[in-house]
Amino acid sequence: MLTKMCAEYAVEKVLGNKMGRWQLPLPSGTLVRRCLFVCKLLGAEAPPRIGAQYWRMVHNGWCTGRRFQDSSAKCVFGCDSEDSIEHYCRCKVVREFLCMPHPNGPGLPIEIAGPSAFFLVHQRLTKKTVLKMAIALHAIFKARHAHKSGQPAYARPLKVSKSFFHSSDHGLYRG
Ligand SMILES: [Zn+2]
């Protein structure tokens, strides 16, 4: 029992610190509770790579320019902003993709688009939208990585994100 309590405490403390990095307008306890809810949802209803990507993103695990102190690295979606998760969660191009209706995007309602929705902790996100958003975030991650790997076929990252979104779908969401 004590071990279980300690484990839960450690998770909440560590995750609270990780989520605090993103400066979302929610109390730490709420962030942790919603993040854990998302993890359980993805673990139960999405392919493992989708949940793994979400966990990696929350923990600043993308190999961005900012993470590697390369201030010259720019947003791969064409902005003149830095290559960082801090930017991508606010990026206008990413937002445009996230707000596109299915099948081109996850159909995030424009009025709640922003960092809290990007990290899947906005209170108005339904389970279905969380699942679609998680797939779209995986698509963004893959498109960004492909672009950074210098693959010429990925010269238009947003277009590739959309195609990754289609290929990542795998029947998880229909309609
Ligand atoms: Zn951008």
Image (tube, rainbow, N blue to C red):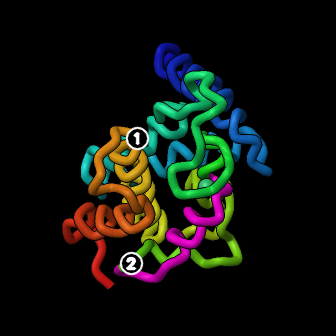
- What's the residue type where badge 1 is placed? Lys
Circle 2 SS class: loop
**What stretch of residues is rendered in magenta?**
89-103
Residue carrying label 1: 148
Taking the image in four quarters, ligand 1 sits in the one at bottom right
Q: Residue at x 47, y 21 (%)?
A: 4
Q: Residue at x 34, y 42 (%)?
A: 150
Q: Residue at x 60, y 78 (%)?
A: 109
The one nearer the camera, 81 or 47, is: 81
The span from disc 1 to disc 2 (Cα, nearest Å) is: 23 Å
Q: Position of residue 62 (x, y in %)?
A: 47, 35
Tell me the quarter of the image containing the C terminus: bottom left
1 horizontally vs 163: left or right? right
Q: Nearer the viewer, mark 1 or mark 2?
A: 1
Q: Position of residue 26 (x, y in %)?
A: 77, 49
Q: Position of residue 32 (x, y in %)?
A: 62, 40
Q: Is residue 170 above or below residue 73?
A: below
Is residue 123 visible in this depiction of the protein?
no
Circle 1 SS class: helix
Is residue 68 visible in this depiction of the protein?
yes
Q: Is residue 138 above or below residue 171?
A: above
Q: Is mark 1 within 8 Å of ligand 1?
A: no
Q: Is mark 2 within 8 Å of ligand 1?
A: no
Residue carrying label 2: 104
Q: Residue at x 60, y 26 (%)?
A: 70
Which mark, by number, is residue 158?
Answer: none
